[in-house]
Amino acid sequence: MRKITVINQKGGTGKTTTAVNLGAALSETGREVLLVDLDPQAGLTESLGVETSGRPTVAELLTGEAGPREAFRALPNLTVLPSSPVLAETEKRLLRERPSDYPLALRDALAGLRGFDFVIVDCPPSLGALSLMGMVYSGSLLIPLQTQYMALNGLEKILGMVKTIREAGFSMEILGILPCMYDVRTSLSRQ
């Protein structure tokens, strides 16, 4: 099973769009794909029309209140582990209750997961606890990056975090940096 975390600390960079479209493209080739929405804004969940009211989400999975199969939602060709705004409080709770090992929460919650060829994790627009969980879980990063000067500052921060994670003994690879929002009319995009 291949795991990929789509990450960038900046909002509006195309993380969710990349995660959804990568998942859809892989599923069209016959692969079994799980999309994990780790963003409390739940953009991936909403973009796929997944209903969350009254049912467990990734928040309940991370706290052990629900198992993976209870929280998963099957769609045609895709399975989604949805998010909701409750995840913001869950993040704080995990930091309080698991201060030394919260980065392992997603890995622990999905331990023993079978039946998927790919798991794609969509992270929030930050480098906080939820993003760290996604990074540690997959060990493989895809970084959508706007073709703008300021986006390079954010990339430096991500690379610094990758270095720190590696120094802590975790495997971490960058699969690629995906240029997004390319505008042929600007010299910065062309560079």
Image (tube, rainbow, N blue to C red):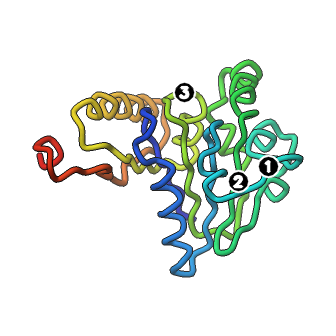
Indicate whether 48 appears above or below 87: below
Indicate whether 79 appears above or below 170: below
Query: Dot 1: within a 10 Å radius of its alpha carbon, few (fewer than 14), some, or many (20 or more) residues?
Result: some
Tell me the residue that label 2 is attached to.
81
Q: Position of residue 91 (x, y in %)?
A: 69, 28
Type of amino acid at the residue the image marks with label 3? Gly
Type of amino acid at the residue the image marks with label 1? Thr
- CA gap between label 1 and label 2 equals 10 Å
Tell me the residue that label 1 is attached to.
52
Q: Which residue sits at x=76%, y=39%?
A: 59
Q: Earlier in the sequence, mark 2 or mark 3?
A: 2
Which label lies toward us, 3 or 1? Answer: 1
- CA gap between label 3 and label 1 equals 24 Å
Q: Position of residue 10 (x, y in %)?
A: 42, 33
| Farthest-out residue, front | 185
Q: Which of marks 3 and 1 is nearer the N terminus?
A: 1
* In the displayed structure image, the side of residue 62 where residue 123 appears, left or right: left
| Farthest-out residue, bottom | 30
Tell me the residue that label 3 is attached to.
128
Q: Which residue sits at x=48%, y=63%?
A: 21
Indicate whether 126 appears above or below 12: above
